[in-house]
Structure formats: structure tokens, C-alpha cells
Image (cartoon, grey):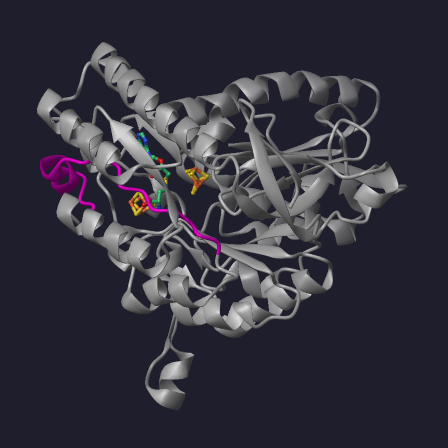
Amino acid sequence: MKGWISRPRTTVAKRLFVKTYGCQMNVYDSARMADVLAPLGYGLADGPEDADMVVLNTCHIREKAAEKVFSELGRLRKLQAAKAQAGGRMILAVAGCVAQAEGEEILRRAPFVDIVLGPQTYHRLPEMVARASRSGGAVLDTEFPAEPKFDFLPEPRAEGSSAFLSVQEGCDKFCTFCVVPYTRGAEYSRSAAAVLAEAAGLAGQGVREITLLGQNVNAWRDDVGRDRDGAGWTLGRLLRALAGVEGVERIRYTTSHPRDMDDDLIAAHADLPQLMPFLHLPVQSGSDRILTAMNRGHDRATYLALVERLKAARPDLALSSDFIVGFPGETDADFADTMALVRQVGFVQTYSFKYSPRPGTPAAAMDGQVPEPVKDRRLAELQALLHDQTVAFNHACVGREMRVLLDRPGRHTGQLVGRSPYMQPVHVKLGGTEAAARLIGRVVPLRIVSVHPNSLEAIPA
Ligand code: SAH
Ligand code: SF4
Ligand code: F3S
């Protein structure tokens, strides 16, 4: 996933360009960095060419993701030099998970970078910009500060009818392949009060769909309630409260860990019509041997039982997942277990990756590293099956009525594009341009009539 944040150019003193790599948490963080810098006079630029400050918000999850940063820095260096020659200055900042993991290395390999900051320190960006501007030397801040950044951020500015809201940060699970516990730090939950206030603020700005984010979003908890009624808050209770926030019509949450799926959260899927019937529940592998080596903390049977319970609670629930092929020691039989699990569950949208050894993680040092051609073959086989399942699901949607959140104009006159409950892009033609424009930001019932390669087509229901 990759996102560009840009807004129409306004008459502001300085321009900021943020390029985002990695997960939705980085998308959220990029928007918040822009919010933090706005009071300093930074408005958003359309591209790096005319920017006074460029932030690369990076991802360290796989080798390829991390490498992209250095090639992008090479390109930006030329722009920065051209700007300096013209008597100007471009401040270059590297943020996010590569910055956290390889901060010193970035400054060594790319000494023209002005600021390196980790995912937990961007509330201090104004101070870092001031320091970089004053001294001309590089600023490095990859601490895990005691104060949570969320307590120091301005209210988010909403864009459009759908918004991300980070409620949980970090990870204590330590899957043996993964860098996140090292780049994002320990699990931390924002308070229910802070989350609900942010949601109300977003709804007040026209947001209709809120996606709660966390690396382990269902590990979210707030123990304040414990003083009052002994229960404390877990994610199910937060979702119920969120469903009561005026204007919030749709709720999603991602990414969940199978280990943290408690009874109340499953029940919330049965009870809350606002909670979309679509859940991203990464399984990684269908082999118990590999799941153990990955330290996932659950086995195949537990995952399958969980899927059954979720589908019993919400029969129209569809699932999405993440898979890794070629984890150290993975045999053909282990891989066949993954294929069998996929056939048994049936997923509608998925992300699948070749195992990428990450420096400092236990799996990188394990015996039995799988040769690249074997990983390639397994990935192709898995992706073919997953693709067939996605296509079959899309076709099964034809004839169904779905409530679609219309969020932007399409390419043709009177056409609008929105998202189905299952995140499928849906196109619909709704009379003239003006009539259509009035429906942007609304959830409307549509009937799906056909399937295109990357979207569904609908008519008013
Ligand atoms: N917290 C989430 C996952 C976050 S990372 C969870 O536990 O499910 C997103 C996905 O990247 C993971 O689900 C995994 O499939 C993939 N991933 C993480 N580390 C990887 C690695 N070293 N090689 C390949 N894929 C990896
Ligand atoms: Fe990584 Fe595992 Fe934590 Fe997910 S649960 S972020 S895969 S260590
Ligand atoms: Fe990547 Fe960091 Fe997200 S490593 S996946 S940007 S938490």
C-alpha cells in the first residue's frame, strides 16, 4: 500500500510533501504529521518538486520496502541540490519504521537528510524543524518517549467521508519474522475518552466511516472502567460506544490478531449493524509446525474455530488475511496445509508475501531458509487460488443489494465511486453531475449489476 497526501494548493508560506509507504498506521501518521506542521505555515504540495519540506514515511516490514527509501532519497537529493542552487532550501525528513530501525545508517548513507524521526516522536516535529533550520546539522529522534504522542497532537483535519483513527500502537507479540515490535515499540492503547472524542470530531467534519487502527487493534484496552464497574474496556465495548457517536454510520477495525478475538468482540459483530461484515484476520500459515515456529500463539484448529464463531455471529461476514510463504523450514507439506486452509475458509481479499529475512529477528537466523525459486513457485500458486476466490466472491455479489458509501466523483458525467461493505470499489451512474455530487458522503442502497477487473458496477436499488 502506498499513499500520497495532497490537498489543493492554498496561499501558504511553505509547502510540505509527505510520501507514505507501508501500512494504514503510516497513512494515519502522515496525515497527523501534516496537522502538526500546519501551524508552522506548511500547506500541502502536489509533489516533491515544489516542496520546502519532504517527509518520507517509511516501512521496514520487508527488505524491498526498506530499499525503496534509499532509492527515493537519491532522487530527492537532486531536487534538494537544485533548490539550494536557486537560493532556496528543502528540508528532508525520514520518518517511520526504517527511520526507527536504521536511523544512524540513514544519516551515514544519506548525510543530506536533515531529520530522522521514529513513529513515536512526530509530535516533536516543529521543534526538530526549528533545530534543523537553525543549525543546518542533522536531527535524529528515534526515542520511545514516555509521553504518548497522541496527547500532543492537534485535532485531525478530516478529508472525505472515511477516516482512519489509530487507537492502539506497537506490539508485544514478537512473531519471529516481524520487525514491528522493534520499530513501533510496546503495545499501548489510547483512552476510550480520547478515541471517542476524536471520532466525534471526525463525524462533525462529515466523516461517516471510521476505521480503528492498531498493529494489534483488538489488543486495545482501557482499564479506567475497572474502577467503576470492575470490567474495564476492551475493543467490543469501544465499538459499541463508537456506534453511538452521532454521524458514524460505518465502523471497521484493523489489524486484528487471532489471539485477541474475545467473546464480546465476536458478539459485537452480531449486535452492531454499523460494524461492517468484513474482517482482516491474518493467519500467515495453515501449518501448525510453521505457526509454532512463527510464535503466532495459535494453531490451525483455533483459527478455523474462530472463523466459525465469527460467521455464526455474522453470517454475511467475509474475511481477508495475510500469508507468508517460504518461512524457514516450510516444506511442501506445510505449504499444502496453507493451501487447504485457504480452500476451507475462502477469503475475499488478501495480502501474500514471500518470507523476507529481517535483521535482528529470530527467524532470520533459523536453519532451513527456503530458496528463492521455491518461494516464487509457492507464492504464485497461493496467489492464483486467492485471486480465484476474490473473483468468485465478486461474481457472487451480482444481483445483491448493498449499501455503498459514495465518496468521490467517477470519470464520467454523473458517475460516482464508493465502497461496498466489503471494501470493493463500486461505480454507479446517478443522473446529472449536480444530483450526483449531492450524494457524495452518503451511504446509499445499490444493486450490483456487473463485475469489472478492479470494481463492481451498480444501479440504484
Ligand atoms: N500485526 C499484524 C501484521 C502486521 S505486518 C498481524 O499480526 O497480523 C503485515 C503483514 O506483513 C503480516 O501480516 C505478514 O504477513 C507480513 N510480514 C511481516 N513480516 C514479514 C516478513 N519478514 N516477510 C514477509 N512478510 C512479512
Ligand atoms: Fe508483527 Fe506478529 Fe506483532 Fe503482527 S503480531 S505486528 S506480525 S510481531
Ligand atoms: Fe511497515 Fe512499520 Fe507499518 S514496518 S507495515 S510501516 S508498522
Magenta region: 276-296
- Residue 73: x percent and y percent? 57, 22
- Residue 321: x percent and y percent? 34, 39
Residue closest to the eye, 123 or 224: 224
Q: Is residue 284 magenta?
A: yes
Using the image, determine if residue 5 lies above or below residue 214: above
Ligand 2 placement by image quarter: top left
Residue closest to the eye, 186 or 278: 278
Using the image, determine if residue 71 lies above or below residue 442: above
Residue displayed at 74% across by 47% down: 440
> Can residue 138 be seen from the camera position used here?
no
Q: Is residue 250 left or right of residue 38?
A: left
Residue displayed at 60% across by 61% down: 249
Residue displayed at 45% across by 22% down: 67
> Can residue 310 be seen from the camera position used here?
yes
- Residue 435: x percent and y percent? 84, 44
Residue displayed at 76% across by 30% down: 46
Q: Is residue 379 magenta?
A: no
